[in-house]
Image (cartoon, rainbow, N blue to C red):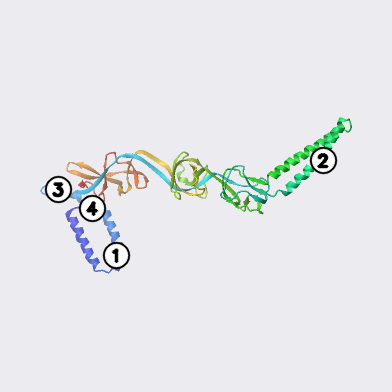
Protein backbone atom coordinates (compact mmCIF):
# COMPACT_ATOMS: atom_id res chain seq x y z
CA UNK A 1 0.00 0.00 0.00
CA UNK A 2 1.29 3.50 -0.87
CA UNK A 3 2.52 5.82 1.95
CA UNK A 4 0.01 8.61 1.30
CA UNK A 5 -2.88 6.11 1.19
CA UNK A 6 -1.73 4.51 4.45
CA UNK A 7 -1.59 7.89 6.19
CA UNK A 8 -5.08 8.81 4.94
CA UNK A 9 -6.56 5.58 6.22
CA UNK A 10 -4.79 6.03 9.58
CA UNK A 11 -6.16 9.58 10.01
CA UNK A 12 -9.66 8.34 9.11
CA UNK A 13 -9.40 5.48 11.64
CA UNK A 14 -8.23 7.84 14.46
CA UNK A 15 -11.03 10.28 13.71
CA UNK A 16 -13.63 7.51 13.81
CA UNK A 17 -12.20 6.26 17.12
CA UNK A 18 -12.42 9.72 18.73
CA UNK A 19 -16.04 10.13 17.66
CA UNK A 20 -16.95 6.64 18.84
CA UNK A 21 -15.45 7.29 22.31
CA UNK A 22 -17.75 10.27 22.73
CA UNK A 23 -20.83 8.21 21.88
CA UNK A 24 -22.74 5.83 24.06
CA UNK A 25 -22.42 2.09 23.62
CA UNK A 26 -25.96 1.95 22.29
CA UNK A 27 -25.21 4.51 19.58
CA UNK A 28 -22.02 2.67 18.58
CA UNK A 29 -23.89 -0.62 18.37
CA UNK A 30 -26.56 1.02 16.23
CA UNK A 31 -23.99 2.18 13.70
CA UNK A 32 -22.02 -1.09 13.65
CA UNK A 33 -23.99 -2.65 10.80
CA UNK A 34 -23.71 0.50 8.70
CA UNK A 35 -19.94 0.67 9.26
CA UNK A 36 -19.48 -3.01 8.39
CA UNK A 37 -21.42 -2.56 5.14
CA UNK A 38 -19.33 0.48 4.25
CA UNK A 39 -16.10 -1.40 5.08
CA UNK A 40 -17.11 -4.35 2.90
CA UNK A 41 -17.82 -1.99 0.00
CA UNK A 42 -14.45 -0.25 0.40
CA UNK A 43 -12.61 -3.58 0.59
CA UNK A 44 -14.27 -4.78 -2.60
CA UNK A 45 -13.14 -1.62 -4.39
CA UNK A 46 -9.63 -1.43 -2.88
CA UNK A 47 -7.98 -3.91 -5.23
CA UNK A 48 -9.35 -2.12 -8.27
CA UNK A 49 -8.29 1.30 -6.92
CA UNK A 50 -4.80 0.10 -6.07
CA UNK A 51 -4.40 -1.33 -9.55
CA UNK A 52 -5.49 1.99 -11.08
CA UNK A 53 -3.04 3.86 -8.83
CA UNK A 54 -0.20 1.56 -9.86
CA UNK A 55 -1.04 2.04 -13.52
CA UNK A 56 -1.06 5.82 -13.13
CA UNK A 57 2.25 5.78 -11.22
CA UNK A 58 3.83 3.69 -13.98
CA UNK A 59 2.58 6.16 -16.62
CA UNK A 60 3.82 9.12 -14.54
CA UNK A 61 7.21 7.51 -14.00
CA UNK A 62 7.61 7.13 -17.76
CA UNK A 63 6.76 10.77 -18.33
CA UNK A 64 8.60 12.21 -15.29
CA UNK A 65 12.08 10.77 -15.49
CA UNK A 66 13.20 12.86 -12.54
CA UNK A 67 10.70 11.35 -10.14
CA UNK A 68 11.89 8.82 -7.61
CA UNK A 69 9.55 5.87 -7.14
CA UNK A 70 9.59 4.21 -3.77
CA UNK A 71 7.51 1.08 -3.26
CA UNK A 72 7.82 -1.47 -0.47
CA UNK A 73 7.14 -5.10 -1.28
CA UNK A 74 4.34 -7.04 0.41
CA UNK A 75 5.16 -10.15 2.42
CA UNK A 76 3.53 -13.31 1.08
CA UNK A 77 3.86 -17.09 1.26
CA UNK A 78 3.69 -19.33 -1.78
CA UNK A 79 2.91 -22.98 -2.49
CA UNK A 80 4.14 -24.77 -5.58
CA UNK A 81 1.29 -26.18 -7.65
CA UNK A 82 1.64 -29.93 -8.21
CA UNK A 83 -0.71 -32.36 -9.98
CA UNK A 84 -2.69 -34.70 -7.74
CA UNK A 85 -5.71 -36.98 -7.92
CA UNK A 86 -9.00 -35.17 -7.35
CA UNK A 87 -12.19 -36.99 -6.33
CA UNK A 88 -15.68 -35.61 -5.93
CA UNK A 89 -18.29 -37.39 -3.80
CA UNK A 90 -22.06 -37.19 -3.44
CA UNK A 91 -22.74 -37.08 0.29
CA UNK A 92 -26.04 -38.66 1.33
CA UNK A 93 -27.73 -40.48 4.19
CA UNK A 94 -28.65 -44.16 3.99
CA UNK A 95 -29.74 -46.99 6.24
CA UNK A 96 -28.46 -50.48 7.00
CA UNK A 97 -30.57 -53.42 5.86
CA UNK A 98 -30.19 -57.20 5.78
CA UNK A 99 -30.94 -59.61 2.95
CA UNK A 100 -32.30 -62.26 5.29
CA UNK A 101 -35.10 -60.72 7.35
CA UNK A 102 -37.74 -63.42 7.75
CA UNK A 103 -41.35 -62.86 8.80
CA UNK A 104 -42.48 -66.04 10.52
CA UNK A 105 -45.95 -67.28 9.52
CA UNK A 106 -47.76 -70.62 9.89
CA UNK A 107 -48.02 -72.81 6.82
CA UNK A 108 -51.72 -73.37 7.46
CA UNK A 109 -54.50 -71.15 8.67
CA UNK A 110 -52.87 -70.53 12.03
CA UNK A 111 -54.32 -71.32 15.41
CA UNK A 112 -54.03 -70.93 19.15
CA UNK A 113 -50.48 -71.02 20.53
CA UNK A 114 -49.94 -73.96 22.87
CA UNK A 115 -46.17 -73.73 23.44
CA UNK A 116 -43.27 -71.33 22.70
CA UNK A 117 -39.74 -72.71 22.37
CA UNK A 118 -37.78 -69.49 21.79
CA UNK A 119 -37.77 -65.93 23.09
CA UNK A 120 -36.71 -62.55 21.72
CA UNK A 121 -32.94 -62.31 21.23
CA UNK A 122 -32.37 -66.07 20.88
CA UNK A 123 -30.15 -67.39 18.10
CA UNK A 124 -32.01 -69.93 15.97
CA UNK A 125 -31.09 -72.23 13.09
CA UNK A 126 -32.99 -72.83 9.88
CA UNK A 127 -35.61 -75.54 10.49
CA UNK A 128 -35.66 -75.07 14.26
CA UNK A 129 -39.07 -75.43 15.97
CA UNK A 130 -40.25 -72.04 17.23
CA UNK A 131 -43.77 -72.67 18.54
CA UNK A 132 -46.59 -75.23 18.64
CA UNK A 133 -50.20 -74.52 17.69
CA UNK A 134 -53.28 -76.32 19.00
CA UNK A 135 -53.50 -79.75 17.28
CA UNK A 136 -56.25 -81.42 19.33
CA UNK A 137 -58.88 -81.59 16.56
CA UNK A 138 -56.39 -82.87 14.00
CA UNK A 139 -55.07 -85.51 16.41
CA UNK A 140 -58.59 -86.77 17.04
CA UNK A 141 -59.23 -86.93 13.31
CA UNK A 142 -56.10 -89.02 12.81
CA UNK A 143 -57.19 -91.45 15.52
CA UNK A 144 -60.59 -91.87 13.87
CA UNK A 145 -59.01 -92.49 10.47
CA UNK A 146 -56.61 -95.02 11.94
CA UNK A 147 -59.54 -96.91 13.47
CA UNK A 148 -61.30 -96.92 10.09
CA UNK A 149 -58.07 -98.07 8.45
CA UNK A 150 -57.73 -101.02 10.82
CA UNK A 151 -61.29 -102.11 9.99
CA UNK A 152 -60.72 -101.67 6.24
CA UNK A 153 -57.46 -103.65 6.37
CA UNK A 154 -59.24 -106.49 8.19
CA UNK A 155 -61.97 -106.59 5.53
CA UNK A 156 -59.35 -106.56 2.79
CA UNK A 157 -57.49 -109.51 4.33
CA UNK A 158 -60.74 -111.49 4.62
CA UNK A 159 -61.57 -110.78 0.98
CA UNK A 160 -58.07 -111.92 -0.02
CA UNK A 161 -58.48 -115.22 1.86
CA UNK A 162 -61.89 -115.84 0.34
CA UNK A 163 -60.59 -114.98 -3.13
CA UNK A 164 -57.80 -117.53 -2.72
CA UNK A 165 -60.47 -120.15 -1.92
CA UNK A 166 -62.44 -119.15 -5.01
CA UNK A 167 -65.13 -117.48 -3.00
CA UNK A 168 -66.40 -113.98 -3.75
CA UNK A 169 -65.95 -111.64 -6.68
CA UNK A 170 -62.90 -109.71 -7.89
CA UNK A 171 -64.87 -106.49 -7.62
CA UNK A 172 -65.37 -107.00 -3.91
CA UNK A 173 -61.64 -107.64 -3.47
CA UNK A 174 -60.65 -104.55 -5.44
CA UNK A 175 -63.18 -102.42 -3.55
CA UNK A 176 -61.73 -103.53 -0.20
CA UNK A 177 -58.19 -102.71 -1.39
CA UNK A 178 -59.33 -99.29 -2.65
CA UNK A 179 -60.81 -98.44 0.77
CA UNK A 180 -57.48 -99.22 2.44
CA UNK A 181 -55.54 -97.08 -0.05
CA UNK A 182 -57.93 -94.12 0.33
CA UNK A 183 -57.74 -94.21 4.11
CA UNK A 184 -53.92 -94.26 3.99
CA UNK A 185 -53.96 -91.20 1.75
CA UNK A 186 -56.36 -89.41 4.08
CA UNK A 187 -54.15 -90.17 7.06
CA UNK A 188 -51.07 -88.85 5.21
CA UNK A 189 -52.95 -85.66 4.35
CA UNK A 190 -54.13 -85.11 7.92
CA UNK A 191 -50.59 -85.81 9.23
CA UNK A 192 -49.36 -83.04 6.94
CA UNK A 193 -51.97 -80.75 8.45
CA UNK A 194 -50.78 -81.85 11.89
CA UNK A 195 -47.22 -80.89 10.95
CA UNK A 196 -48.49 -77.42 10.00
CA UNK A 197 -49.23 -76.81 13.66
CA UNK A 198 -45.45 -76.76 14.15
CA UNK A 199 -43.96 -73.38 13.17
CA UNK A 200 -40.31 -73.56 12.09
CA UNK A 201 -37.59 -70.98 11.36
CA UNK A 202 -37.07 -70.49 7.63
CA UNK A 203 -33.64 -68.82 8.06
CA UNK A 204 -30.86 -68.84 10.60
CA UNK A 205 -30.37 -65.71 12.71
CA UNK A 206 -31.55 -64.08 15.89
CA UNK A 207 -35.13 -63.53 16.96
CA UNK A 208 -35.54 -59.79 16.51
CA UNK A 209 -39.28 -59.60 17.28
CA UNK A 210 -41.39 -61.97 19.38
CA UNK A 211 -44.97 -60.83 19.91
CA UNK A 212 -46.58 -64.29 20.02
CA UNK A 213 -47.98 -65.43 23.40
CA UNK A 214 -49.31 -68.77 24.67
CA UNK A 215 -53.10 -68.77 24.39
CA UNK A 216 -53.24 -66.17 21.63
CA UNK A 217 -54.25 -66.90 18.06
CA UNK A 218 -51.16 -66.88 15.83
CA UNK A 219 -51.54 -66.05 12.14
CA UNK A 220 -48.12 -64.41 11.59
CA UNK A 221 -49.21 -60.78 11.31
CA UNK A 222 -51.29 -58.67 13.67
CA UNK A 223 -52.65 -55.69 11.77
CA UNK A 224 -49.67 -54.72 9.63
CA UNK A 225 -47.00 -55.83 12.15
CA UNK A 226 -45.24 -59.22 11.96
CA UNK A 227 -45.52 -61.20 15.20
CA UNK A 228 -42.12 -62.87 14.81
CA UNK A 229 -39.12 -61.69 12.75
CA UNK A 230 -35.75 -63.39 12.40
CA UNK A 231 -32.78 -61.36 11.20
CA UNK A 232 -29.59 -62.80 9.73
CA UNK A 233 -26.80 -60.20 9.77
CA UNK A 234 -24.31 -62.26 7.76
CA UNK A 235 -25.35 -60.40 4.59
CA UNK A 236 -25.74 -56.68 5.25
CA UNK A 237 -26.14 -53.77 2.86
CA UNK A 238 -26.67 -50.02 2.90
CA UNK A 239 -29.67 -48.69 1.01
CA UNK A 240 -29.45 -45.07 -0.18
CA UNK A 241 -31.98 -42.92 -2.05
CA UNK A 242 -30.01 -40.89 -4.63
CA UNK A 243 -31.58 -37.77 -6.24
CA UNK A 244 -32.46 -38.36 -9.89
CA UNK A 245 -30.17 -35.58 -11.16
CA UNK A 246 -27.23 -37.88 -10.34
CA UNK A 247 -28.61 -40.72 -12.50
CA UNK A 248 -25.94 -40.30 -15.18
CA UNK A 249 -23.11 -40.08 -12.63
CA UNK A 250 -23.84 -43.09 -10.42
CA UNK A 251 -23.30 -46.53 -11.91
CA UNK A 252 -23.17 -50.11 -10.76
CA UNK A 253 -19.67 -50.58 -9.38
CA UNK A 254 -19.20 -46.93 -8.34
CA UNK A 255 -17.02 -46.59 -5.25
CA UNK A 256 -18.81 -45.90 -1.96
CA UNK A 257 -17.37 -44.76 1.37
CA UNK A 258 -19.69 -45.72 4.24
CA UNK A 259 -19.56 -44.41 7.80
CA UNK A 260 -21.66 -45.82 10.67
CA UNK A 261 -21.43 -42.94 13.19
CA UNK A 262 -23.12 -44.78 16.07
CA UNK A 263 -20.31 -47.34 16.25
CA UNK A 264 -17.54 -45.17 14.72
CA UNK A 265 -16.77 -47.60 11.90
CA UNK A 266 -15.93 -46.88 8.26
CA UNK A 267 -16.12 -49.16 5.24
CA UNK A 268 -15.33 -49.00 1.54
CA UNK A 269 -17.70 -50.73 -0.86
CA UNK A 270 -19.21 -50.48 -4.35
CA UNK A 271 -22.69 -49.97 -5.73
CA UNK A 272 -24.09 -53.50 -6.23
CA UNK A 273 -27.64 -52.57 -7.26
CA UNK A 274 -29.45 -49.61 -8.85
CA UNK A 275 -33.24 -49.55 -9.04
CA UNK A 276 -34.76 -49.54 -12.50
CA UNK A 277 -37.26 -46.75 -11.73
CA UNK A 278 -37.51 -43.36 -10.05
CA UNK A 279 -39.47 -43.09 -6.82
CA UNK A 280 -42.23 -40.55 -7.61
CA UNK A 281 -42.43 -39.44 -3.97
CA UNK A 282 -38.72 -38.75 -3.36
CA UNK A 283 -37.68 -38.16 -7.01
CA UNK A 284 -34.74 -40.46 -6.39
CA UNK A 285 -33.53 -43.96 -7.20
CA UNK A 286 -32.44 -46.64 -4.74
CA UNK A 287 -28.88 -47.98 -4.58
CA UNK A 288 -27.39 -50.79 -2.53
CA UNK A 289 -23.82 -51.32 -1.33
CA UNK A 290 -22.64 -54.42 0.51
CA UNK A 291 -21.27 -54.38 4.07
CA UNK A 292 -19.11 -57.05 5.71
CA UNK A 293 -20.67 -59.23 8.40
CA UNK A 294 -20.33 -57.40 11.71
CA UNK A 295 -22.22 -58.19 14.91
CA UNK A 296 -22.09 -54.54 15.96
CA UNK A 297 -24.05 -53.37 12.89
CA UNK A 298 -27.82 -53.48 13.20
CA UNK A 299 -30.50 -53.27 10.48
CA UNK A 300 -32.06 -49.80 10.13
CA UNK A 301 -28.96 -48.12 11.58
CA UNK A 302 -28.08 -44.70 10.16
CA UNK A 303 -25.26 -44.69 7.58
CA UNK A 304 -23.46 -41.72 6.05
CA UNK A 305 -22.71 -42.49 2.41
CA UNK A 306 -20.22 -40.82 0.03
CA UNK A 307 -20.60 -42.00 -3.58
CA UNK A 308 -17.73 -41.23 -5.96
CA UNK A 309 -19.29 -39.51 -8.98
CA UNK A 310 -16.22 -37.76 -10.46
CA UNK A 311 -12.50 -38.53 -10.53
CA UNK A 312 -9.70 -36.55 -12.21
CA UNK A 313 -6.18 -38.00 -12.02
CA UNK A 314 -3.23 -35.57 -12.11
CA UNK A 315 -5.46 -32.53 -11.65
CA UNK A 316 -4.45 -29.07 -10.47
CA UNK A 317 -6.07 -28.61 -7.06
CA UNK A 318 -5.95 -25.49 -4.88
CA UNK A 319 -7.66 -24.33 -1.68
CA UNK A 320 -11.01 -22.86 -2.62
CA UNK A 321 -10.39 -19.69 -0.55
CA UNK A 322 -7.48 -18.70 -2.82
CA UNK A 323 -9.78 -18.35 -5.83
CA UNK A 324 -11.09 -14.78 -6.22
CA UNK A 325 -13.59 -13.21 -8.62
CA UNK A 326 -13.87 -10.00 -10.60
CA UNK A 327 -16.00 -8.82 -13.52
CA UNK A 328 -13.97 -11.00 -15.90
CA UNK A 329 -14.31 -14.23 -13.90
CA UNK A 330 -12.24 -16.34 -11.52
CA UNK A 331 -8.53 -15.79 -10.85
CA UNK A 332 -5.65 -16.55 -8.47
CA UNK A 333 -2.37 -14.80 -7.74
CA UNK A 334 1.00 -16.37 -8.51
CA UNK A 335 4.44 -15.03 -7.67
CA UNK A 336 6.82 -14.61 -10.61
CA UNK A 337 10.36 -13.27 -10.82
CA UNK A 338 10.83 -10.43 -13.31
CA UNK A 339 13.68 -7.99 -14.04
CA UNK A 340 12.67 -5.70 -11.17
CA UNK A 341 12.27 -8.59 -8.70
CA UNK A 342 9.39 -10.76 -7.53
CA UNK A 343 5.89 -9.52 -8.33
CA UNK A 344 2.34 -10.87 -8.01
CA UNK A 345 0.54 -11.70 -11.24
CA UNK A 346 -3.16 -12.34 -11.66
CA UNK A 347 -3.91 -15.60 -13.46
CA UNK A 348 -7.41 -16.22 -14.82
CA UNK A 349 -8.58 -19.78 -14.11
CA UNK A 350 -11.47 -22.05 -15.00
CA UNK A 351 -12.67 -24.02 -11.99
CA UNK A 352 -14.24 -27.48 -11.93
CA UNK A 353 -15.72 -29.45 -9.06
CA UNK A 354 -15.44 -28.39 -5.42
CA UNK A 355 -14.83 -31.00 -2.72
CA UNK A 356 -14.57 -29.78 0.84
CA UNK A 357 -11.97 -27.01 1.07
CA UNK A 358 -10.43 -27.68 -2.35
CA UNK A 359 -11.38 -26.91 -5.93
CA UNK A 360 -10.20 -28.43 -9.20
CA UNK A 361 -8.58 -25.97 -11.64
CA UNK A 362 -9.44 -26.99 -15.20
CA UNK A 363 -7.25 -24.43 -16.97
CA UNK A 364 -5.04 -21.52 -15.96
CA UNK A 365 -2.39 -23.20 -13.80
CA UNK A 366 0.50 -25.50 -14.63
CA UNK A 367 2.74 -27.62 -12.44
CA UNK A 368 5.37 -25.50 -10.71
CA UNK A 369 3.38 -22.26 -10.55
CA UNK A 370 4.09 -20.43 -7.27
CA UNK A 371 0.59 -19.93 -5.92
CA UNK A 372 0.23 -17.12 -3.37
CA UNK A 373 -1.23 -18.90 -0.34
CA UNK A 374 -0.80 -16.16 2.31
CA UNK A 375 -1.00 -12.41 1.94
CA UNK A 376 -3.17 -12.62 -1.17
CA UNK A 377 -5.78 -10.31 0.34
CA UNK A 378 -5.52 -6.84 -1.22
CA UNK A 379 -2.91 -7.89 -3.78
CA UNK A 380 -3.04 -6.27 -7.21
CA UNK A 381 -1.54 -7.30 -10.50
CA UNK A 382 2.15 -6.38 -10.71
CA UNK A 383 2.59 -5.54 -7.02
CA UNK A 384 6.08 -6.18 -5.68
CA UNK A 385 6.18 -9.05 -3.18
CA UNK A 386 8.70 -10.84 -1.05
CA UNK A 387 8.55 -14.21 0.63
CA UNK A 388 7.61 -14.28 4.27
Mark 3 vs mark 2: which is more N-terminal?
A: 3
Question: Which SS class for mark 2?
Answer: helix
**Label number found at residue 31:** 1
Mark 1 vs mark 4: which is more N-terminal?
A: 1
Q: Nearer the viewer, mark 1 or mark 3?
A: 1
Q: Say whether residue 6 is visible.
A: yes
Q: Nearer the viewer, mark 2 or mark 1?
A: 2
Q: Identify which residue, 242 or 263, lies in the foreground.
A: 263
| C-alpha separation, residue under disc 2 versus residue under disc 1 | 111 Å
Mark 4 vs mark 3: which is more N-terminal?
A: 4
Proximity of marks 1 and 4: CB atoms separated by less than 8 Å = no
Residue linked to disc 2: 151
Left or right for 84, reference 60: right
Residue linked to disc 3: 61
Which quadrant of the figure has residue 371?
Answer: top left
Question: Which SS class for mark 1?
Answer: helix
Q: Position of residue 194 (x, y in %)?
A: 70, 45
Q: Identify which residue, 243 or 308, lies in the foreground.
A: 308
Q: Nearer the viewer, mark 1 or mark 4?
A: 1
Residue linked to disc 4: 49
Which quadrant of the figure has residue 344?
Answer: top left
| C-alpha separation, residue under disc 2 versus residue under disc 4 | 117 Å
Amino acid sequence: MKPFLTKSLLVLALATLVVACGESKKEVAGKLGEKKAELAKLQSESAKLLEQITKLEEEISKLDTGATKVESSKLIAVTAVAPQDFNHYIELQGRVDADDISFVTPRGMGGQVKALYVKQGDIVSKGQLLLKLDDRVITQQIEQLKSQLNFAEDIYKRRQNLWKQGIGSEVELLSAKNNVDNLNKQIDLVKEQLNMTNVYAEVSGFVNTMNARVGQVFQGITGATPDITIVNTSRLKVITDVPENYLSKVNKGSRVEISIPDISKNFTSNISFISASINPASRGFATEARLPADASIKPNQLALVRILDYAAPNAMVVPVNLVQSDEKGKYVFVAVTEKDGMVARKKPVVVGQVQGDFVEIKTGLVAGDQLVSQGYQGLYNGQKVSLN
